[in-house]
Image (cartoon, helix red, strand yellow):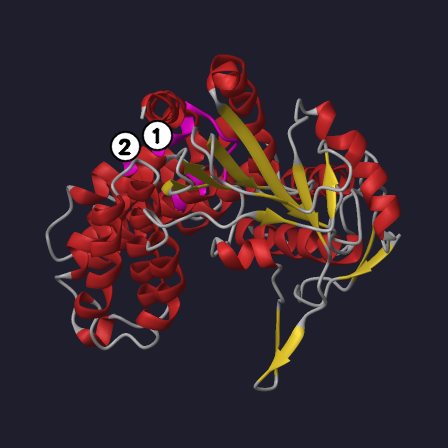
Amino acid sequence: MKTVLAACATFVVLTLLVSAQAPAPSDQPTTASGCLTATRAFQQARMKEAGTPLAREKYDAVLRDKTEFAKACIAKLPLDSLPPAELLPLANLYSEAGQPDLATTTMQKALDVSRAVPEDHAKVLVAAVRAMMRQPVSESRNAAAEKLVGQVEALPATFVRERLEAHGTLNSYYRADDIDAGIITHSTRIIELNKALTPEQRVPPMSNMLVAAYENLAEALAGQEQNAKALDILRRASVELAGVPGVAERLTPTVERYQLVGMPGAAIQAPTWLNAPAGTTKIDMKGSVTWVQFTAHWCGPCRESYPAVGRMLQKFGSKGFRVVMATQFYGYFESRRNLAPADELAAITEYFPKHGITVPIAVADNIPPVTENGKTVRAINVNDASYKVSGIPQIQLIDKKGNIRLIMIGFDEANEAKMAALIERLLKE
């Protein structure tokens, strides 16, 4: 297969073997930074070629090919004569090649040689945080990254931007991994550091990171029954980020979502249902303590929540607790594209039980996008609209009176005990 790599000036065409023996390109970069650019361009081109939505098996194949590409590029480098400036790109390249030990060793060399000049050391520390978080997910990786951020914090107070960039890197990864403790720690620090910035410094990409910190912190706190505090943080953002355009517009949907807490939960409705009596069109929220979860067959974090859902049902299902899920047709399933609703329904009818989910699932129709003010906008179904869904999994706990008591975005296993305690309290009301 031949892939054109427009983003890489070092070569134009590569012959790729989709096996573990992918050869090195004939026009090989001779620097670590060149190899790193080529490797990332290679992966980007392969991802584009694979198309979207990307099935897991194709994604894994792309990663394997990228790893072999990086290894082949490293093998051609003059490693013994690389200048100090190439050490950090080499560390990143080792990460792309799936060699985290070599990445860590090389990263430490880069840090050691930069210590003499504080400005250089600050830049390398921030880059090292980013490089560390590209390594395979593990608690030791996170701990190593936290240690690097601690070193950034130990720099003179003038290095505010570097502090923000380091905390922002960890904050984005913790948000992606739904690790609330990390989100709260780093979002809080970013909001504190914002006070030291001038209006001229609150520009993209810095301003985007600042707004995300307010939103991420609010979502994490709301998921831990601190809804009032979450709303306060969201409302403070426009004041504390004065001069940053679009803050209120970006955060208004999030404010509206958490304003639902304490309000009656809307019935979940759909023309198609799984695991529900024939003729079901909606399920009202009153009468039971209800875990309402928005989910999808393509959603990895959703799958991670399913074992906890099973444990909750096993513990509380006989005491008046139930789970209702909501999804929709997407027109595809794994690698199968352009599926008719009947075919996708058959696929998810098998999919959810394989993951232990046999609760009622509302399946909304796939509504085509609409055009508003000349822009294509994703149309949302009635359930998403009722609960202000913007990302999944989104979980609501609803009391026997039908009122929403908690909204959680994502699922952090560390919160399972707190969720169980809340369910137990609601069942006693």
Residue 429 in percent (x, y) is at 31, 26
Element marked by disc 1? helix
Residue 146 in percent (x, y) is at 30, 34
Query: Hey, which quadrant is residue 415 in on the image?
Result: top left
The disc labelled 1 sits on which kind of residue?
Ala
Q: Is residue 236 left or right of residue 337?
A: left
Report the front residue among 351 and 187.
351
- Residue 368 lies in the magenta stretch: no
Crowding at mark 2 (Cα within 10 Å: few <14, some 14-19, many 20+): few
Q: Farthest residue in the bottom direction?
A: 373
Residue 2 is labelled as none
In the image, residue 259 sits, relative to residue 239, either above or below, namely above
Crowding at mark 1 (Cα within 10 Å: few <14, some 14-19, many 20+): some
Q: Which residues are magenta?
A: 128-148
Asked if the residues shown at circle 1 and circle 2 are in contact, with their CB atoms under 8 angstroms apart, the answer is yes
* Camera sees residue 94: no
In the image, residue 15 sits, relative to residue 59, either above or below, namely below
Residue 144 is labelled as 1
Please give the residue where the numbered disc 2 appears in the rendered image: 147
The disc labelled 2 sits on which kind of residue?
Lys
Q: Is residue 137 left or right of residue 68?
A: left
Q: CA distance from mark 1 to mark 2?
A: 5 Å
Magenta stretch prevailing secondary structure: helix
Report the front residue among 20 and 57.
57
Q: Which residue is located at x 61 percent, y 37 percent?
A: 300
In the image, residue 37 sits, relative to residue 55, either above or below, namely below
In the image, residue 199 sits, relative to residue 25, either above or below, namely below
